[in-house]
Every structure is written in C-alpha cells, then in structure tokens.
Image: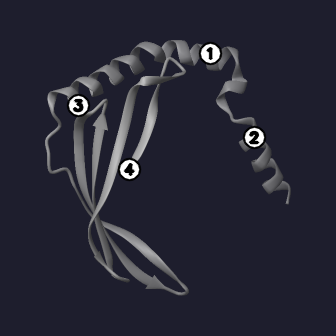
C-alpha cells in the first residue's frame, strides 16, 4: 500500500491523502503476474484496475510485457468531479504558469539534471 500527501498550492496537505493499494491476484513463477490496484482519495474509492504482465526470458534477463489492463468499475461521481476540478485548475493556472516560465526561464529546468546531462555528454 502506498500513501502520499497531496500538494495543494505548492504546500503539502495533511488533510488530503491519496492511497493506492496493490494486491497480487495471480502468479505463475517465471511466466506471469496479475494484480489489482485500488485508489482511495480521502478514504473514497476513485476506481480500480486489473493489470496482467507476462514474463519472457531474453538473454541473461527477462522481458516484462503488459498484456491486459481493465477498469472493472466505472468512475463514480466523486471521481468525475475531481477530474473536472483538476481540468478547471489546469485551464485557470496555465496563463500564469506560462508567464512565470517566460519571466524566470530557470524554472523550466532542473539544474541538477542539467549538470548530470552535461557531465554525461562530456564523458
């Protein structure tokens, strides 16, 4: 089970939580693994998925291939409301974020990643 606080306005909110649980529902050694994920937003179910992977030997390793992904439950009204809110938030904040990126171009890149990229390119 994974649990994480949600960022609200750039600040971690302890009042809002997102929990993802993962349950293995099938396993054949060296052949396949199937599992179900469930998502809870502040304790309310916002959907689940069934996912299947198959394993294939390749050289000294193994290739993992997703063979199936199903959403057994239609999203409920709460989930649709949250998607709508996120969409509205994105539309409303996009002009402001674009302005910030123009005024402060350093916001566009992660300096640590840029240093790593530069070091790799020089090696």
Judge depth for marks 2 and 1 and give the one in front: 2
Q: Which residue is mark 4?
A: 1
Judge depth for marks 4 and 1 and give the one in front: 4
Q: Is residue 5 above or below residue 30?
A: above
Dot 4 crowding, Cα within 10 Å, few <14, some 14–19, many 20+: few
103 vs 79, left or right, is: right
Judge depth for marks 3 and 2 and give the one in front: 3
Residue located 19% across and 50% down the image: 71
Looking at marks 3 and 2 on the same chain, the residue that comes earlier in the sequence is marked by 3
Looking at marks 4 and 1 on the same chain, the residue that comes earlier in the sequence is marked by 4
Judge depth for marks 3 and 1 and give the one in front: 3
Q: Which residue is mark 3?
A: 79
Q: Which residue is mark 2?
A: 112
| Spatial CA span between label 3 and label 4 | 20 Å
Dot 1 crowding, Cα within 10 Å, few <14, some 14–19, many 20+: some
Q: Is residue 63 above or below residue 42?
A: below
| Tag 3 and tag 1, C-beta contact below 8 Å | no
Q: Nearer the viewer, residue 62 or 103?
A: 62
Looking at marks 4 and 2 on the same chain, the residue that comes earlier in the sequence is marked by 4
Residue located 31% across and 76% down the image: 32
**Spot occupied by residue 70 in the image (x, y as percentages of width and height):** 20, 55
Number of marks: 4
- What secondary structure is marked by label 1? helix
Quadrant in the rendering for residue 18: top left
């Amino acid at each position: 089970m994974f649990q994480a606080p949600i960022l609200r306005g750039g600040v971690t909110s302890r009042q809002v939580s997102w929990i993802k649980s993962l349950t293995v529902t099938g396993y054949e050694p060296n052949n396949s693994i199937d599992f179900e994920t469930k998502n809870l937003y502040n304790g309310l179910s916002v959907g689940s998925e069934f996912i299947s992977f198959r394993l294939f030997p390749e050289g000294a390793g193994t290739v993992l291939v997703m063979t199936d992904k199903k959403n057994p439950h239609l999203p409920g009204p709460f989930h649709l409301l949250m998607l709508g809110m996120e969409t509205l938030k994105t539309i409303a904040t996009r002009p402001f974020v674009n302005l910030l990126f123009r005024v402060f171009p350093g916001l566009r890149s992660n300096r640590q990643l840029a240093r790593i990229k530069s070091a790799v390119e020089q090696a």
